[in-house]
Amino acid sequence: MATTIINAMTTENDFSLLRLMQLSSVSLPVGGFSFSQGLEYAIDTGWIKNAVQVANWVETQMTESLAHLDLPVLKLAMTALSQADQVAMPLSQCNDLILACRETKELKLTDTAMGEALSRLLRSLAIPLPFAKNEDVSFVIVFAVAAHYWRIPFHKTALGFSWSWLENQIAAATKLVPLGQTQAQQLLGQLQTSIPMAINVAETVSTENIGAGLPAVAIASARHETQYSRLFRS
């Protein structure tokens, strides 16, 4: 009886929101917590020393990288999944594009390792995936597949994806600077206001203009590969 009442009261939007929360959760076993995406080197070498500098580093990546690369490709991938016969860019090309834009071996590993982990999880949930098990697939693409399967619209999917990325970056900074838990929550509150702006920019980026170049992030990521001591994976 209770289950029947709950099902009657819960809308499809509620279910898609719950799935989005699951997909964006820090407890999702995809290993995002094990990568700093260059942040560890930037802190170790003294580029970043406090919460204000963390905020600048993270916000720049959100507005200049996520907004111009990850989120536009996420949108392209979701379009490819929903309009398979008419789409301008097939899913495989979306995947090739974003992996080609990863500027270092470490950044590509971050993307494909998380993509592989999410793929394993989705297969365990009996969600069909349109690529082979041994194929290098971007986390962005697999995230799009899950969102499409659970009927989550792009805007909400982009919110969840961006929040997950932001939370992982602040969690890394909390360990590395280090920051207190209160400072971390203040940063999350401050930086989450940039997420809607990044999504709005992503909506306007044409396919031929997709891409991002942040030299300091690329240098930090490349040097992190040989850093003498690391908390985060390389």
Image: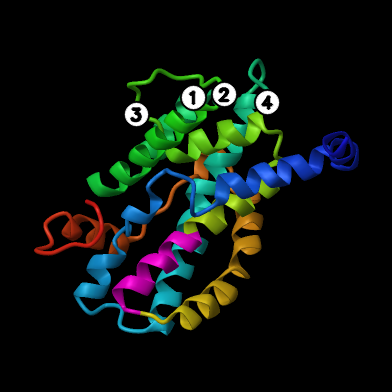
Q: Nearer the viewer, residue 196 or 215?
A: 196
Spot the residue most to the top.
Answer: 85
What range of the chain is rendered magenta?
A: 166-178
Distance in Å between CA atoms under marks 1 and 2: 5 Å
Badge 4 vs badge 2, beta-carbon distance below 8 Å: no
Dot 1 lies on which element?
Answer: helix
Up-down relation of residue 197 to residue 116 (above or below): below
Three-letter code, disc 1: Arg
* Mark 2–mark 3 CB contact (< 8 Å): no
> In the rendered image, is residue 104 in sight?
no
Label 4, on which residue? Answer: 82
- In the picture, residue 51 is in which quadrant? bottom left
Residue found at the far left of this picture: 228
Circle 2 residue: 127
Residue sitting farthest toward the front: 1
Residue occupied by mark 3: 136
Residue on which disc 1 sits: 123
